[in-house]
Amino acid sequence: MIIISLALAAFAAATLWWTMHAWRTPETLASTRFSAPDGDHRLTFSLLVPARHEEAVLSHTVARLLESSHQGFEVIIIVGHDDPETTAVAHQVAASAPGRVLVVTDHNEQKNKPRALNTALPYCRGDVVGVFDAEDQVHPSLLEHVDHAFRSTGADVVQGGVQLINFHSSWYSLHNCLEYFFWFRSRLHLHADKGFIPLGGNTVFVRTDVLRGANGWDGTCLAEDCDLGVRLSSRGAKVVVAYDSSIVTREETPNSLAGLLKQRTRWNQGFLQVYRKGEWRRLPGFGQRMLARYTLTGPFMQAFSGVIIPVGVAIAMWAQLPVGVALMTFVPVVPMAANLVFQIVGLRDFGKQYEVRIRWHHYTRLIIGAAPYALVLTVAALRAVWREYTGKRNWELTQHVGAHLGAQIVASEGRAA
Amino acid sequence: MTTTDDRRPGDADTLVDVPRTVGAGFDIPKARRATSPMRPSPVPPAVPNRAPSATSSRVLSRPDRYLACGLTVLVLAVLATNITGFPSATDDEGTYLAQAWAVQQGNGLAHYTYWYDHPPLGWIQLAALSWLPALLGWHEPTVAVGRLAMLPVVAASLLLVYLISRRLGLARWAAALALLTYGLSPLAVTMNRQIYLDSFAVAWILAAVALALSPRRHLWHYTAAGIATAIAVLSKETMLVAVPAVLVAMWQNGSRSSTRPWTFGGYASGLVLVGVFYPLYALLRGELIPGAGHVSLLGAWQFQLASRSGSGSVFQAGSGSWSLVHSWLYYDPVILVEGLASTVIALAMRRLRAAALAAALLAIIALRPGGYLPAMFVVQILPFFAIVIAGVIHHGVIGLSPRRHWWRATVLGVIAVIAVAGIVPRWYAGDRRALVADDNASYSAAAHYLRTTVPHRDETTVVVDDVLWLDCVGAGYRTDNVIWFYKLDLDPAVAARLHHGWRDVDYIVSTPALRQDAASLPTVTTLLTHSTVIASYGSDTGRIDIRHIDKETA
């Protein structure tokens, strides 16, 4: 029991320590930002926007992309052959900006994001391929910063910040936003420093030659972004992460708890797949391999601690244990509680950086919601393990395609009735 | 997975097609691009992660280290010489050492029922250091020998005083002055030799201040500062008073820093999450809330804060606090008076404010009328007084800028000579006394008598003060039969062990500590009246009598 407690405490402490990476010293924090661009536009970009049943948001997203202050970029919208509505919108947008926007049709039977991206890869003419989701709000000066980041650091990959913004929408969105905040603001920088990085799903820029050399994305993987990061890392690609709250790509949280659960299950299962693929074993450093192992299994360790720590504490409270042992079971709670303290500070910082007013009830919500949110994550992790080992490896679709899936279910139920 | 194998014929499925398909309107200006399109333009050296302040992040430069260590060794030599002879052992020292002994033996947190009088971390640390006196093979009196365990603690405090002084921007000579003031003031020499929980608390709070002033401003340093503060408070609860000073140090050190809110998060986490283990311990033992039949943490706090009778006002002649402060002044008025004056000045100076605030808060607690003033409280104030004294002198010298004009140098020289002439003889006399006095001879002799002359020790019950308690346990008396005199009247568990009341006691050792409180302890008074002196050491008020109980006379 003591050993388990100490192991859990060590795990939680390490996670906390890595989560806090960017705020270790003022200098580390300064180094996580984009350096100011020099105004030179030397690289050219091909921006991929896979869109699936997203006719509502697509034109706005592309319009934002076209506002970019950078001179050398093209936008490639990837639509499915079975999705005429989005295709229509895409062509409409392309017509509005001839030469800048290209529409590519994905004819794969089974549609998912990595396959869509692979479909578009041969069309890319820019020096750098960038990926965005159809609902992203991209800042006009982002490309300029990324251009400069590539040139000033000699990077092969630049990961920009992504931030969920609608923290006020629901109790879980607050936690979801903060998760993104800590991940992109801090944790990813640590990964970039250590040379092992699970990339994010969008606002990620890769040199086209490097991407082609790596054979693009894995069309069977549920976390193609993570997988790409792992493969590029193990090939020694140099990854740079930069976060600037002013030019971060803004997104929204899943619009229902079920959506969040599905999304998280997919990511977790994707991590598990990447872990099982074992590409990370090719990483040169032992420390890197340990970090990879740790990161890829992290969600499951988290789920495990989420279950075991409360049990331990309950035993300590109600069973007649020696006081010393009982005290030990509380040790893993310390880093978890510290994490909550830092989340409170993080929420305040989030409010300042994004100029939103954080009120006292948000802090209350943060504290009260911490345990239920951990429970959701635990359920998602267990669900991911269950799906992976029962062989359910299909792309479990989140909100935009979820509607489509829901319609099918309704239809089949209708037929059954 | 390759990029092409999923596509159907008829798509634009080769790269060659692409330019034809989209080329016409595809307009990516590359005019300013360097010669080779796929190579990044010449890469400037990677952006350095470290700021220029990296040079100042060294803990201390080499001369600093030699100076601080050399002076610390010097002070330690003064402290260690005759440490068993002066000052006379006090009951408190005996209590802490006995509690440390209980921890070491696995008997719980005290040699009697632990009633949350103080948080236990101080004597747990003392227990961890108790191998040190044992190493030298000295034996009695145990308390005086046990003082050796305090030397590493004081050494840490001395080095930290130097480090803090440097981090507050003092010159090397001023930091050395702070160290020497703290180390050699006769009051400090007296107090630092003794086994007090306050010394542990001082070392930890100084560590917290030093960490809060860390030039690297690392999040971990601030978290560690929080942990150190928690340990300080759990070593001696009154250290809580100094917490604002650590916060001020952090606030000033983090000014114009982008990470300041996070540093406070780290500090709060460290402080609260370590500190909470103390009430948690009480909770797990079912001793958090007052209730019938058991001691409790909250009950003890209520007693300490509300019920405990005060020791009177410092400003009222004859009160307990008054005589206590006068005894401090007797040892060394210099550090106290000058420290208080410097604190007032230093509060107005930004660089010195953190240390001055600690000194001021602790002084206010000491001087507040009506509160309870413990005898060793001054231990907590002394290092901060030393730092502010040195700091004010440092800034005074800089303000005078003696290099600008010969008369300025002369004025400074005259002041220095007067100060040295006034202080050095006084300190010399005080420290010399510490080096030669033998104030514990009576205790030593009494311990020797109890160990060698008393027959049938394993069946004999003795009542002693806490200085001799461990000596008796070590001499072969059964632990249950060595009774700390307070507990006869105040601990029901002890009274229950004596089936025939005071007649179960065979000897009582009457010491100054025992006689001081005997009036309020009826059983002790009875024992003193029904006993005869069989051995006596020393004279007058410092006398130690070993008395045999006359069981037939009642």
Image (tube, grey):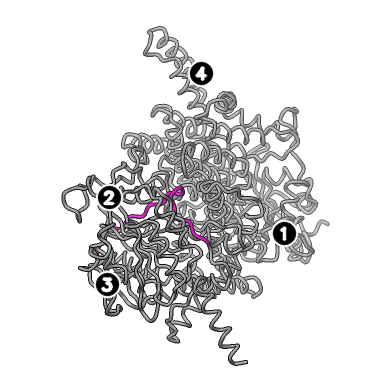
Q: Which amino acid does label 2 sit on?
A: Thr
Outermost right residue: B554
Q: Is residue A241 magenta?
A: yes
Question: Which circle marks residue B102 in the picture?
Answer: none
Nearer-N-terminus badge (3/4): 3
Q: Mark 3 points at which residue?
A: B12
Is residue B45 at all visible to an observer of this figure? yes
Question: Which circle marks residue B422 in the picture?
Answer: 4
Q: Is residue B162 magenta?
A: no
Image point (37%, 41%), residue name:
B59
The magenta segment: A235-252
Nearer-N-terminus badge (4/1): 1
Q: Name the residue under label 1.
A: B296
Query: Do marks 3 and 4 both belong to one polypeptide chain?
Result: yes
Q: What residue type is labelled 1?
A: Ser
Q: Mainly helix, strand or loop, the magenta region?
A: loop
Query: Do marks 2 and 1 both belong to one polypeptide chain?
Result: no
Q: Residues within 10 Å of mark 2 (few under 14, many from 20)?
A: many
Indicate the secondary structure of the residue bearing disc 2.
Answer: helix
The quadrant of the image that shows the N terminus of chain B is bottom left
- Mark 4 or 1: in front is 1
Judging depth in this view, the residue of B220 and B181 nearest the camera is B220
**Chain letter of the residue carrying label 2:** A
- Mark 3 or 1: in front is 3
Q: Name the residue under label 2.
A: A153
Indicate the secondary structure of the residue bearing disc 4.
Answer: helix
Q: How far apart are marks 2 and 3 (CA)?
A: 35 Å
In this picture, residue A351 sits left or right of residue A112: right
Residue B322: x, y in percent? Answer: 70, 31
